[in-house]
Amino acid sequence: MRVCVVGGGLAGMLLAWRLVRHPGVRVTLVTGAPGTRDSTAVSGGLVRGFEADPQAAELAARSLQELRASALLREWSQYQETGSLYLLHAAPPLRRLIDVDRSLPGSVLILDRRELVARYGFGGLPEQTAAVLERHAGYISPDALRHGARADFAARGGVLDSTDLRALDRPEGGELGYRTGAGRGTADLVVLAAGGWTGRLLTRLGLPAPQLRTKVIQCALYATAGDHPPPFVDETSGLYGRPAGPGRMLLGLPTDRWDTDPGQRVFLDREERAVREAAALRLPGLALNPPHHFTAMSEAYAPEGRLALRAALPYPSGLFTFTGGSGGAAKTALAASSAAAGELLAPIPITEGERS
């Protein structure tokens, strides 16, 4: 079987790496031009088992379970087990906590508002706030994980094409023809894993665009002093962050910039000021200096809010997308890529839409 994966970010790289490890599968990865800055390069890399969406939570927990079980993946990803906090408006359903504990035994504790204030210095929390504390969680470098998988992919005989996809022919005789900057090729399956560029790429190729939107993710790295919480997401304010070395924290808030062009975007001072205001309220013991590193990047958002394999055209076209992580793909990419590889290689075809 011949598979062409288009997209050199974490999702595409891990999918290509999963596929090339199967005997009889020949994989070409079209990465785009060298030096292209993407969301993988700037991701904060938070990893944990709990998520608001049950299916995303399952993928996140399975990804963290695989990461913690593999010395190689921990080395590639520069994994730091620091614990994490997920603040909610109210205590989560017990069933959800049991699911996480099944994958990560002994990791989960529930903290109430009083404990969050006493242990971590949070302030201004609504009365019913509760948090999921995961001891076996932390953060990775998605870019480092990508580079580790890329080297192993090449060592296993995978073909790296560092150009762009230029054209895609409708399937004829059970195969797809494609053209990149390096020349022409054919494949049994083509998977577009180009993140925020996926919708535009399909449109440019004259194919129906999936239900994908783009949204800007903006965050900044601050020199700090005072009380430093572990990696956290606070649903009551939207604030999220993680330590980034001694005396430094990465902090951000969701933006309202939808349907933007893919790639790097303008960093907005008004959004950064909103982060400072939220941090002053929620983390009163944390002193922030002006940001000395910042980023704004457009990412792909799917209606389901998670990274998954989807048929781009009705069977048996052989054309799929693997994107839609909605800003959280780093924590689910290991399990999602494993599931996607299994579906692509299964004898039963994927129907139009999503199977996960």
Image: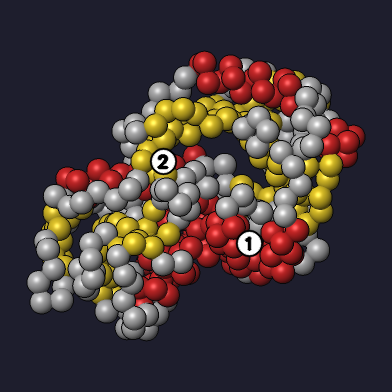
Q: Residue at x 41, y 35 (%)?
A: 215
Residue 191 bears which disc, if any? none
Q: Amino acid at mark 2?
A: Glu
Q: Front-most of 249 and 231?
A: 231
Residue 61 bears which disc, if any? 1
206 lies left or right of 194: left
Element under disc 2: strand
Can residue 184 be spotted in the picture?
no
Element under disc 1: helix
Q: Residue at x 37, y 83 (%)?
A: 23
330 lies left or right of 275: left
CA gap between label 1 and label 2 equals 22 Å
Quarter-of-image position of residue 316: bottom left
Q: Which residue is mark 2?
A: 299
Q: Earlier in the sequence, mark 1 or mark 2?
A: 1
Q: Amino acid at mark 1?
A: Ala
Other residues around mark 2 within 10 Å, as few (<14) / some (14–19) / many (≥20) = many
* Image coords of residue 28 (percent x, y): 28, 66
* Image coords of residue 207 (percent x, y): 17, 52
Quadrant that contains the N terminus: bottom left
User: 244 above or below 165?
Assistant: above
Can residue 98 be spotted in the picture?
yes
Other residues around mark 1 within 10 Å, as few (<14) / some (14–19) / many (≥20) = many
Q: Front-most of 356 and 231?
A: 356
* Image coords of residue 328 (percent x, y): 52, 47
* Image coords of residue 198 (percent x, y): 30, 48
Q: Front-most of 334 and 226?
A: 334
User: 144 above or below 246?
Assistant: below
113 lies left or right of 337: right
Q: Residue at x 57, y 42 (%)?
A: 44
Q: Residue at x 9, y 72 (%)?
A: 172
165 lies left or right of 73: left
